[in-house]
Amino acid sequence: MNEAATIPVELVPVKLIGVLGSAAGNREIVLPAPNVLTVQELISTLLNTVGNKFFRELLVDAGTEDPRSNVIILLNDQDCNIFDGLMTQIEPGTKVTIIPVAHGG
C-alpha cells in the first residue's frame, strides 16, 4: 500500500492590534506551521498570507527588513526580545500578539 504520510500541522493564531488588524483586514490570522517556526519565519508567512503592501509597510522597516522598530511582538504576553529576538522559536500553543509602535517627533 502506498499511503501518504501526514505531517501534523500546528496552527498559530496571530492577534493584530490597531492599525495592523485594519490593514490586514482581520484582527486575528491563523497561520499553519508544519514545524516549529521562528519569529522571523512567522513574519514572512504572515506577510505572504496578507499580501498587502500597506500592511508590509506598517509591519516591517523597509531599510532593515526588521519588524521590531515598528512593532512589539509578544509571545504569550512577553516581548520576543527577552528571548532570542527574531530567532525565537514559536512552540505549539504559543499566543502571538503584534502591537504597532507609535513614533513621535
Image: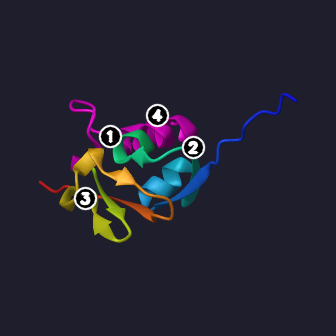
| Circle nearer the viewer, 1 or 3 | 1
Circle 1 SS class: loop
Residue 20 appears anywhere in the view: yes
Circle 3 SS class: loop
Over which residues does the magenta segment extend?
43-69
The structure residue drawn at horizontal position 44% and vertical position 54%, both measured from the top left corner, is: 20
From mark 1 to mark 3, how far is it between C-alphas?
14 Å
Which numbered disc, 4 or 1, marks the residue that appears first in the sequence?
A: 4
Instruction: Tell me if mark 1 has few (under 14), some (14-19) or many (20+) residues whose alpha carbon lies within 10 angstroms of its own.
Output: some
Which numbered disc, 2 or 1, marks the residue that appears first in the sequence?
A: 2
Q: Return the mark for residue 60.
A: 1
| Apparent side of residue 88 relative to residue 91 in the rendered image (left or right) | left
Residue type, numbered disc 2: Pro
Task: Identify whether 54 is placed above or below 28.
Answer: above
The residue that mark 4 highlights is 53
The residue that mark 3 highlights is 102
| Circle nearer the viewer, 2 or 4 | 2
Residue 7: x and y in percent read 65, 42
Which quadrant of the figure contains the N terminus? Answer: top right
